[in-house]
């Protein structure tokens, strides 16, 4: 597949449509940043996400055009420094278990890493999902910190938020400075919205339990004007399914019912992030999973423009004309 962008359209698109779903970095290697996030910081785009090659857990790439990506480093590996934290049930990152084979890569599973920046503390805080190598039973959240977006993160350990199971997760930094951790609880049956502590390192409160029994995964939240939106997927392992959207005025406010987002497979993807761009544009970012084990490294990333109806209902748009990047 030709990885060279042929137009100034969104990443993954040419004038003829969407073509490129994996990217080659400046070293000539495939970008691995799955279940990830793209942030704007210091006049550049930063893409962080799962990289499960060998002892690596989370990697970081930088771009000035959202199309060409420079590798900036492995943020978290099985050999990352650790620091104890009183609220963590375990500060052991590896937990390799002799005789038990990791599903993907080596050691523990780290999924869906997401960053928050704490401006006053000048600290990047990574929240993620942590599991033992070969199953999803522990259902823990984990936290790591660094003073640079692309530095070596110090792992602070894993735990169950307020004792609740915690699997697919995301973070949200609201305009009032509040920070939120959203994760699938009760064996994925419920979706929890937690307010984070002022330093973003801990859970302060469980504010909402959304759609009890709804079996939602892959949450991601974004703000458009005075409305918040949340995308979630259904729960079908690595296979894509119909995603949905919901809206609220505040994270701890009342969330609407869910309505369908995209087609029956969300264009063969599962949500991971929505990136706000200038001029009221929002970019949907989803994982097209290659599957578990040997299939996983073939996972791709889907970028799709989000359109809004006059009533503010989000959807996927096929009209790429407003999406030429300058
Ligand atoms: C779907 C989740 O969204 C992924 O992050 C991963 O946990 C797979 N399920 C595992 O089946």
Image: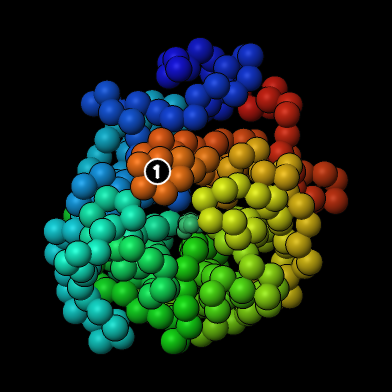
For residue 19, side relative to residue 320 (left or right) = left
Point 50% across, 24% down: residue: 20
Residue tagged by mark 1? 296
For residue 17, side relative to residue 290 (left or right) = right
Point 20% across, 51% down: residue: 55
- Percent x, y of residue 185: 54, 76
For residue 161, side relative to residue 156 (left or right) = right
Q: Residue 220 sits in which quadrant? A: bottom right
- Residue extending furthest toward the right: 311
Where is the N terminus found, in terms of image quarters? Answer: top left
Residue 71 seen in the figure: yes
Where is the C terminus found, in terms of image quarters? Answer: top right
- Percent x, y of residue 219: 57, 60
Point 47% across, 78% down: residue: 165
Front in this rendered view, residue 46 or 301: 301
Count neighbours of disc 1 (C-alpha within 10 A) and say few if under 14, some if 14 to 19, many if 20 or more. Answer: some
- Percent x, y of residue 282: 62, 42
SS under mark 1: helix
Front in this rendered view, residue 284 or 90: 90
Point 85% across, 45% down: residue: 310
């Amino acid at each position: 597949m030709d990885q060279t962008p042929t137009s100034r359209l969104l990443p993954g698109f040419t004038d003829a449509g969407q073509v490129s779903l994996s990217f080659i970095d400046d070293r000539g290697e495939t970008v691995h940043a799955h279940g990830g996030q793209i942030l704007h910081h210091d006049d550049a785009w930063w893409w962080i996400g799962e990289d499960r090659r060998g002892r690596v857990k989370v990697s970081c790439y930088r771009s000035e055009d959202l199309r060409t990506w420079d590798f900036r480093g492995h943020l978290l590996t099985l050999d990352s420094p650790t620091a104890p934290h009183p609220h963590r049930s375990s500060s052991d990152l590896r937990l390799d278990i002799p005789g038990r084979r990791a599903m993907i890569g080596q050691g523990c599973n780290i999924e869906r890493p997401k960053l928050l920046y704490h401006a006053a503390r000048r600290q990047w805080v990574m929240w993620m999902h942590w599991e033992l190598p070969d199953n999803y039973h522990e259902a823990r959240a984990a936290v790591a910190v660094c003073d640079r977006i692309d530095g070596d993160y110090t792992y602070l350990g894993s735990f169950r938020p307020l004792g609740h199971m915690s699997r697919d997760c995301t973070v949200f930094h609201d305009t009032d400075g509040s920070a939120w951790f959203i994760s699938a609880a009760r064996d994925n049956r419920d979706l929890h919205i937690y307010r984070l502590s002022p330093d973003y390192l801990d859970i302060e409160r469980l504010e909402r339990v959304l759609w009890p029994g709804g079996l939602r995964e892959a949450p991601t939240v974004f703000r458009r004007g005075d409305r918040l939106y949340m995308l979630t997927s259904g729960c079908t392992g690595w296979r894509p399914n119909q995603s949905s959207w919901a809206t609220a005025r505040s994270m701890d406010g009342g969330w609407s019912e869910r309505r369908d987002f995209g087609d029956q497979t969300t264009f063969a993807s599962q949500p991971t992030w929505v990136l706000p761009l200038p001029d009221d544009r929002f970019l949907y970012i989803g994982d097209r999973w290659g599957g578990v084990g040997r299939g996983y490294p073939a996972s791709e990333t889907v970028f799709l423009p989000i359109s809004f109806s006059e009533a503010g209902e989000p959807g996927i748009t096929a009209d790429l004309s407003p999406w030429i990047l300058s």
